[in-house]
Each structure stands twice: as structure tokens, then as C-alpha cells.
Image (tube, rainbow, N blue to C red):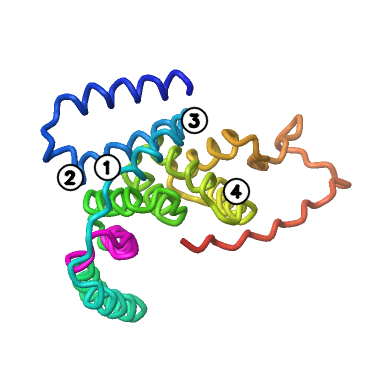
Amino acid sequence: MGDAGRMAALALAVWGAAVTPALAQDSERNRYYVQQMIELAASHDEQGVIAMQRMLEQEPRPTATDPAAAAAALQRGQAAFRQEDLNAALSAFQQASRSDPGNPDAVNYQGLIYRKLGRLTDSERALQLALALDPDRAVAWFQLAQVYGLEKDDRRALGSLANTYRYAQNPMRAEEILRNIAENETADALRNAAVAALRLYRLPVEPAIVPPLPSNPGIVPMDAPSEPARAPRPAPTP
């Protein structure tokens, strides 16, 4: 484990000794683990990330009170989401979480909807809870990176994108998405985080193409070849 990982483990031990047993079981502790996974990923401390993930996986999972009701609410929410009825979808996903608090899909969808509604703090909390339930969910890491990009939090955006690539089932597709963000994203924090994530994993980073200036900007050689236009890359699908 790297220095950052050892510091996180020490901080966690001190923090754990200070909380009550009831608090140790609630969602705040799990969100702490997720936050540490973000920081450790930004430092490229793979062993630290794994250690935090193992701690999450050892936490007791909430028990469903009504699995059938949760499944039905989840289906209603997905149908409403496809119809772009965000309020109805959010209500259904919240009902699914009440019936099955251990369902990561329900809180993952809530995080996505909160972001679309501009409720970034609620979105961050929901996505962190989804990751506490399913820490290798790459899509939730990607959505969390988008939240941090909107909040202009470069460090956490980097850590979340690094974990997006780390947990991606299709690393080539994840690399393509990172490069697309690095080349085309207008939000500085998210674009810079994508560039940093590519470099973190030693993946190629295409530098911005800036045509060289002639010795006299007012004089252009008649035989200068024209530069063909680059076709834009398709936008990634969240």
C-alpha cells in the first residue's frame, strides 16, 4: 500500500474508534470509504483503492423489506425515465429504495436524475451510496465524475474517472470515452481530469492541434498545403 493508502487506513482507524456502534453501521461510514477510493485513485494508489473496496464489501448489506414492491417500483421508474418524466421517475426510484435499501440500481438512477435536475449535492450522495453497495460499478463512477466536473472539483473528478477506467468491463471503450472528454469537453474540470486520468494509466493523450505561425504572420506562402479538417469524435454515452 502506498503512503496515501497507509494514511487513509490510519485515518480510518482513528475515525472508527471515535464513532458510536450505531453510526458505524450507517451510510455515512460507507460514503467515507467511497470518498477514500476517490482520493486514492487520484493518487494512483491501486492497493489503497482495493483496501477500501474490501472494507466496503465487508459491511452488512441492507435487507429488503418488500422485494416485489421494489422490483415493480424500479420498472415504473425506468419507464418514466425513458419518457423523460424525471419527477415521476425519481418518486418511483425512491419507493424502490424504501422497499429494498440494498438495491444499487435504485440509488444509481436517483443520482442520475438529481444531476439532471441540478441537485448536485443530492446526486453526489446518491451515487456514493450506489457505489457503497456496488463499488465496481463503472457507470456510477462516471456519473459521479460528471457531478464533480460540474462542481469544478478537479481532484475528485480525476479520482472518479480513474475508477471509471479501473472498473470498466470494456477498457477500450472506457479509454475512448476518456479521450473524447479530453478532446471535446467544454467544462475545464472534467476535461482536465480526463487528460490526467489518461496519463495516470499511461494511455496516449492526443495534444491539442495548434497550427504553427509563419515567421511573418502577414505573409502566407502560396504553396502552403491546406490542412484537412478532422472529423469530430462521437459524444460518449453516459
Q: Residues within 10 Å of mark 1 (few under 14, many from 20)?
A: many
| Separation (CA) of disc 4 from disc 3 | 25 Å
Residue appearing at x 11%, y 40% in the figure: 22
Q: Which residue is mark 4?
A: 179
Q: Position of residue 229 (x, y in %)?
A: 72, 57
Q: Earlier in the sequence, mark 1 or mark 4?
A: 1
Residue 203: x, y in percent? 65, 39
The residue that mark 1 highlights is: 30
- Secondary structure beneath dot 3 equals helix
Which residue is depicted at the point 21% across and 46% down? 27
Density class for disc 2 (Cα within 10 Å; few <14, some 14-19, many ≥20) is few
Is 74 on the left or on the right of 231, as rendered?
Answer: left
CB-based contact (under 8 Å), mark 2 and mark 1: yes
Disc 2 designates what residue?
26
Which callout, 2 or 4, points at the residue further toward the start of the chain? 2
Residue type at mark 1: give it.
Answer: Asn
Image position of 200 (left or right of 156):
right
As helix, strand or loop, the secondary structure at mark 2 comes to loop
- Distance Cα–Cα, label 2 vs label 4: 37 Å
Amino acid type for the residue under numbered disc 3: Gln
Question: Magenta stretch?
Answer: 97-115
Q: How many marks?
A: 4
Say if 125 sits above or below 210 in the image. below
The amino acid beneath tag 2 is Asp
- Mark 1 near mark 4, Cβ–Cβ under 8 Å? no
Q: CA distance from mark 2 to mark 1?
A: 7 Å
Upstream in the sequence, badge 3 or badge 2? 2
Residue 9 location, quadrant: top left
